[in-house]
Amino acid sequence: MTEPRPSSTVIVLREAAGGFEVLLGRRPRGQAFGGAWVFPGGVVDPEDHEHDLTGIDGPDAPWRAAALREVAEEVGIFLTDPALTSENVLEGRAVHEHVRTSGATWRYDRLSYLSNWITPEGLPKRFDTRFFLAVVEAEMLGPISDELEVVEWMSPEVALRRYEDDEIELIMPTIAHLRLLLPFASAEDADRFARTQDRVDPVQPRIVRRDGKIDIEIP
């Protein structure tokens, strides 16, 4: 059985007129989830485990380090103190090095732990993904990596409507989290919910067969 790889995903939110918006980017065809609109994220890399490099403490430090690095890599948002930018797209270890050599520190407290999804057993690629929320200012968006063809801010309602109208592709975890965000009036409300959860239980969908067809069921 394939063991799931530790991964992090960040649902980046900003306040907007009449509510809030979430940042989504479209993956290029030929890459994982090609053509789908996704939240920034990726696997936990070896450098994310290096405390001397990241300066991040706590039992979930590698997941938070990966989350912060991926947001900086893919959409140029550095959640640091003091605020940082980069004119160029940075990748991997270079992201953490940029923060450290600039004399800044990661604001890992700006990530609120929302959920934990584990890819169903039986698939060739599996991920143990922690989803974090991060509320940012509208102007923080930086250079976009080639892991995304285009990025857009959308309200959860608009993203789901565009999906239902076949305008955009979404994968199941993205749909589930957009639906989870629907009841909240603001980004701060969503962030408050994540921070005040008593616990986060893993969600592990199952592959099931119904009437001769393969389906995925969420417990």
Image (spheres, rainbow, N blue to C red):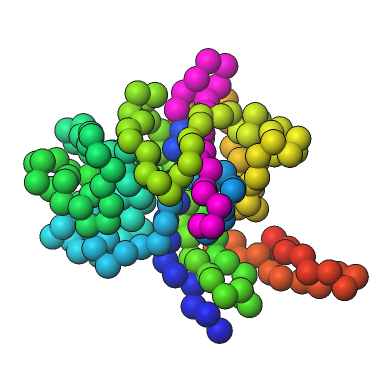
Where residue 14 sits in the image (x, y, percent)? Answer: 45, 28
Q: Is 12 located above or below residue 173 in the figure?
A: above
Quadrant for the C terminus in the image = bottom right
**Residue 76 showing in the rendered view:** yes
Given residues 142 and 53, the one toward you in this image is 142
Quadrant (top left/top right/bottom left/bottom right) for the N terminus: bottom right
Q: How many callouts does the rendering have?
A: 0
28 inside magenta stretch: yes
- Residue 6 occupies quadrant: bottom left
As drawn, is 82 to the left or to the right of 49? left
Query: For the point 44% across and 70% down, which residue is it?
Result: 5
Quarter holding residue 201? bottom right
Q: Please state the extent of the stretch shown in magenta in the rendering.
A: 14-31
Give the left or right position of residue 71, taking residue 149 as reference: left
Above or below for 145 versus 209:
above
Question: Which residue occupies 59% across, 61% down?
Answer: 203
Residue 118 falls inside the magenta stretch: no
Magenta residues, dominant SS class: strand
**Extreme residue toward the top, this view:** 17
In the rendered image, the residue lying farthest to the right is 211
Where is residue 121, by image quadrant? Answer: bottom right
Query: Residue 214: x, y in percent?
Result: 78, 69
Q: Residue at x 37, y 44 (%)?
A: 145
Q: Does 93 sit left or right of 39 as displayed?
A: left
Observer able to see residue 68: no
- The x and y percentages for residue 47 are 24, 63
Residue 155 lies, in percent from the top left, at: 58, 28
Q: Decide which of 25, 14 is in the foreground and name it.
A: 25
